[in-house]
Image (cartoon, helix red, strand yellow):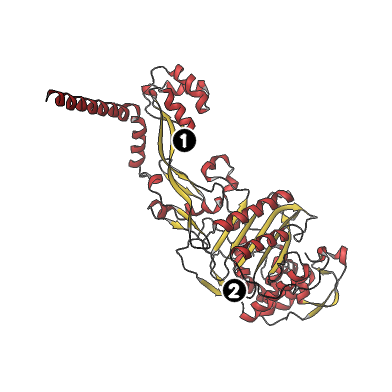
Amino acid sequence: MAYRFSIILSAVLLAYGFLVFHLYQVQLVKGGYYMAKAQSEIAGSGDASANRGAIYFTDENGSALPAAVNQQSPVIYAVPSAIKNPATAAAKVAPIVGISEAKLAKIFSKPNDSYELLVKKADQAMADKITALNITGVVADHEPERFYPLGAVASQVLGYVGPSASGNAQTGHYGIEGFYNTSLQGASDVTLTIDPNVQIEAEKILDDLVAVNNATGGSVIVENPTTGAIIAMGGDPSFDPNDYAASPLANFLNTDVQGVYEPGSIMKVITMAAAIDAGKLGPNDTYTDKGYVDINKRHLTNYDLLTHGAWGAGTTMTQVIEHSINSGAIYAENQTGNDTYLSYLKKFGFDQKTGIDLPGEVSGNLSQLTAKAPQVAWDTAAYGQGVAVTPVALVSAISAIANGGVMMRPYLNAAQKPQEIRRVLSTSTAATVSQMMVDAVDLAQVANVNGYALAGKTGSAFVPNPAGGGYLNMLNDSYVGFGPVSNPRFVAFIRLNTLPVTSLAAQSVVPAFKRLSQFLINYYNIAPDRPTNDIVPNCKLLLCN
């Protein structure tokens, strides 16, 4: 009996000792940490990181892949008021945390300071080394942190979680984290239409393209034209949301929605669509190309005038698209009329936001097209200079052509339903313009994939001078296309920024579009929609830009 009593007494004393030790840890050693957390909660932040909803990607099979989740991350902090020998502690801690010994000694010497954060998101090896030092007042613990398993993949779509403006809370910044911050803080998960397999491949193609061409950056978008769902969206350079502080602010911006650019010859598709839909022209209507247009004391030439010369009489509207003829786009705009042409640009949404569920979206700029504008402004707009669009709006416009003339709102939240914005073109016009774009792809034989009818159009445009007025001697190259035309499954857009003036989209972005199209065709297991080798003979590459 006495033996049992001794065991019970020992157990009670041990438990009591553990309790006292735990209280010491909580109240003295970790007191500053918990006080800081309590103060944050009082300020209204709550434990936002621990309770924040997750973000998921969705693949072709409907499987969800975590894109942003919460995990316990090591944190190293000090309780200076509990450190007995600041100088000695600083000497031991400095090599581990990468903070100078002098700076640590100053921090550790604060007599009434109960909490100093040393390293946030420390790695476990660092935390283990701090724990092994066993210095009272220097603590390695864990706290909930936002974690992005795929690193920089789709970072500009996702955004990141960081301190709020007041510093008392964690909040979403940029991307989905910012746009759906209230829902995510309410512990609601958000599942995106982004397919991780397509996203990763699209970003790889873009990164390779930027590197090979020594571009300053670029962007890529893949959209389902029948629903408006964004399947992939990315930019280069990007950033790692797990370590966002290591990247410049500019890398956080999603230029697909937060920036505009002059699209160049891609706009010829829109110009031709307006002329055809307004009943002013047909694909086989002709004009005489002199290789240039003189208007308002300006001499506007075809991009290939020096290498090819004028295309001459009998040049069809289809050939205008096939050979990207500037004077032909001008002719189509002139036949349409300025007022009607502008109404179509607005139908396509180039002066509006698309309504995509991402923060900071801007609208395009058609401000130069006014009733008092000189005709040269309208003529250059016809081939994509002097007007500016966002890439997402341009993809939305081309998606409307792919979708039989009906424009859908682009979206990322898979819980949303497809939303029709408006009919932009008649079904017959959309089919006609689609075929003209197919003819352009077939003729050039750069973007074509054997057995599939793919539609596409290049765009090379001078970069506006940021200092104001005129253009730099540099180009932005872009390409947009869709397919298969019989039942479009995807619209893909690729852009390269700030290239030498000698660059041609046919040689830069078009092969990348083909690579991406081949991946999408294989990934979605899309059946061929026409006999193989059903294309026209090859043309000279430089004549098909």
Query: In the shown orientation, is residue 113 left or right of residue 20?
Result: right
Tell me the SS state at disc 2.
Answer: loop
Query: In the shown orientation, is residue 135 left or right of residue 430?
Result: left
Whether residue 390 is visible, yes or no, is: no
Give the residue number, with chain letter if any, for mark 2.
Answer: 403
Q: Of 449 and 215, which appears nearest the observer?
A: 449
Residue ID at (53%, 55%): 360
Check the image and report above or below for 216 versus 17. Answer: below
Whether residue 4 is visible, yes or no, is: yes
Q: Quadrant of residue 16?
A: top left
Q: Position of residue 60 (x, y in %)?
A: 53, 63
Q: Amino acid at mark 2?
A: Asn
Tell me if label 1 and label 2 are in contact, CB under 8 Å: no
Q: Amino acid at mark 1?
A: Lys
Q: Quadrant of residue 143?
A: top left
The circle on residue 120 is 1
Residue ID at (48%, 23%): 93
Q: Of 192 and 103, which appears nearest the observer?
A: 192
Q: Of 263 and 318, which appears nearest the observer?
A: 318
Q: Position of residue 259 (x, y in %)?
A: 61, 56
